[in-house]
Amino acid sequence: MGAVMVRCPQTGRDIPTGIVSDRQSFQAMPVFFGRVRCPACQAEHEWFAGDAWVRETPRREAVSA
């Protein structure tokens, strides 16, 4: 699982959309448009699902004692 990300067109920074998914499920979704308030530039951006990607959260490895 991870955050669905898009790129801010003004700053070029990667920003989270607020959607959490795994890559396979996100890629299987129907094509859609979304909107997100950008924490990088404070503007609202419209985005296309085809331009988004999933940044998966790294799994923590078990630490043996």
Image (cartoon, rainbow, N blue to C red):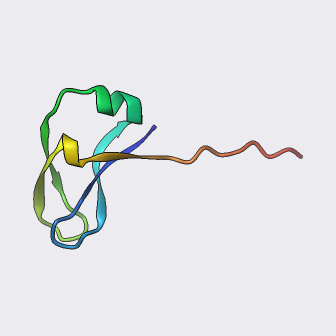
Along the line of sight, the residue nearer the viewer: 28 or 1: 28
- Give the number of marks: 0
- Residue 21 rendering spot, x and y as whole percentages: 37, 35
- The residue shown at (12%, 57%) is 45
Q: Residue at x 56, y 48 (%)?
A: 58
Q: Is residue 1 left or right of residue 40?
A: right
Give left or right: position of 22 versus 5. right
Residue 9 lies, with reference to residue 6, above or below; the image says below
In the rendered view, tell whether residue 63 sits above or below residue 12.
above
Q: Residue 26's quadrant in the figure?
A: top left
x and y percentages locating residue 17 in the rendered image:
26, 49
Q: Dividing the picture into quarters, in which one does residue 33 lie?
A: top left
View extreme (right): residue: 65
Nearest the eye: 41 or 53: 53
Q: Residue at x 75, y 42 (%)?
A: 62
Image position, residue 19 (x, y; %): 30, 40
Q: Residue at x 60, y 43 (%)?
A: 59
- Rendered location of residue 35, percent (x, y): 13, 48
